[in-house]
Image (cartoon, grey):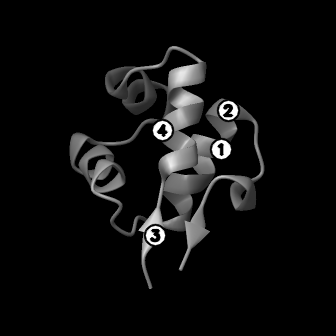
Amino acid sequence: MRIRYNKLQKLMIDNQMERQDLMHAAEISSSVATKLNKNEIVSIDVLMRICKVFIVILAMYVKSY
């Protein structure tokens, strides 16, 4: 199964948020941020922390194939 975080990246652009801003706001490490950039699997906990930053529903921004 492939994971794409394209909508998350678009959401970051729309909110003028850079990688460092997301890392600080969601309290994620640089290695987790790299996994997101490489469309690799991250834990549900990480995704939920990111969703809390943007106050969104997880299913809206993660797409699996």
Q: Secondary structure at mark 3?
A: strand
- Distance CA(mark 2)–CA(mark 3): 19 Å
Residue 21 locus on image (x, y percent): 41, 20
Image position of 56 with respect to 16: above or below: below
Label 4, residues with CA under 10 Å away: few <14, some 14-19, many ≥20: some
Of circles 2 and 4, the one toward us is 4
Residue 65 locus on image (x, y percent): 53, 80
Label 2, residues with CA under 10 Å away: few <14, some 14-19, many ≥20: some
- Horizontal relation, residue 30 to residue 3: left or right: left
Label 3, residues with CA under 10 Å away: few <14, some 14-19, many ≥20: some
- Distance CA(mark 1)–CA(mark 2): 5 Å
Disc with the residue nearer the chain's start (2 vs 3): 3
Image position of 11 with respect to 14: above or below: below
- Distance CA(mark 3)–CA(mark 1): 16 Å
- Horizontal relation, residue 54 to residue 50: left or right: right
Disc with the residue nearer the chain's start (4 vs 3): 3
- Horizontal relation, residue 2 to residue 31: left or right: right
Disc 3: which residue: 3
Q: Secondary structure at mark 2?
A: helix
Disc with the residue nearer the chain's start (2 vs 4): 4
Disc 2: which residue: 54
Of circles 4 and 1, the one toward us is 4
Disc 4: which residue: 9
Image position of 10 with respect to 38: above or below: above
Q: Residue at x 51, y 23 (%)?
A: 13
Q: Secondary structure at mark 4?
A: helix
Disc 1: which residue: 51
Q: Amino acid at mark 1?
A: Cys
Q: Residue at x 70, y 56 (%)?
A: 58
